[in-house]
Image: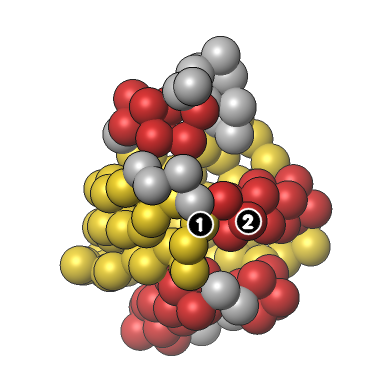
Amino acid sequence: MNTEENKRVVHELFARISRGDLDGMLALLSDDVNWWIAGELEGVPAAGDHDKKQVAGILASMHQQLKGNLRLSVHSLTAEDERVCAQVSGHGELNNGRLYRNQYHFLIGLEGGKIVSVREYLDTKHVEKTWFSP
C-alpha cells in the first residue's frame, strides 16, 4: 500500500475507536499486532506490550468506564514507507465524573493494509490520576 492508503487506515482506526466500534477497530489490526503503551505498570496498568486480545480487553474496560465514547481527534498524520506517525488528542468523561483529556503521539507500522505495530506515547501522569487514582 502507498503512504496515502496507510494514512487512511490509521485515520479510520481512530474514527472507529471514537464511534465505540471495537470490532471494527480490531479488524484493522493484524492477528499478531504488538501494541506498546508508554508508562510504568505501578501507575498505568495498561503500560507495556500487548497482543490483539489484550488490546481488545483494554479498550473494552475503558469503554465501560466512560460516559459515551472516547473521542479521538487526529491533528496530523505523517507517513513514510510502512509507518505512519499520528498526533492525536483524546477526550472523554468517566462515569465517576472525571474528565480525561490527553495528547498522544502514535508510531504505527502497517503491512498489506493491516496495522502490525503501535507505539503509543501519552501523558502517563494524567492517565494515572484520571483512571487509576482513588
Residue farthest toward the top in the current orientation of the protein: 42
Residue at 60%, 27% (x, y): give it.
45
Residue 134 in the image, given as x and y percentages of width and height:
49, 22
Res 33 seen here: no
**Residue contact between numbered discs 2 and 1, judged by CB atoms under 8 Å:** yes
Mark 1 highlights which residue? 66
Residue 39 in the image, given as x and y percentages of width and height:
46, 25
Q: Which amino acid type is shown beneath numbered disc 2?
A: Gln
Res 72 seen here: yes
Residue neighbourhood size for the residue with mark 1, other residues' Cα within 10 Å, grouped as few (<14), some (14–19), many (≥20): some
Q: Is residue 25 left or right of residue 72?
A: right
Q: Nearer the viewer, residue 114 or 93?
A: 93
Q: Secondary structure at mark 1?
A: strand
Q: Which amino acid type is shown beneath numbered disc 1?
A: Leu
Q: Secondary structure at mark 2?
A: helix
Mark 2 highlights which residue? 64
Residue 47 in the image, given as x and y percentages of width and height:
56, 30
Q: Nearer the viewer, residue 71 or 38?
A: 71
Residue 20 in the image, given as x and y percentages of width and height:
56, 74
Give how far apart the Cα atoms at labels 2 and 1 are: 6 Å
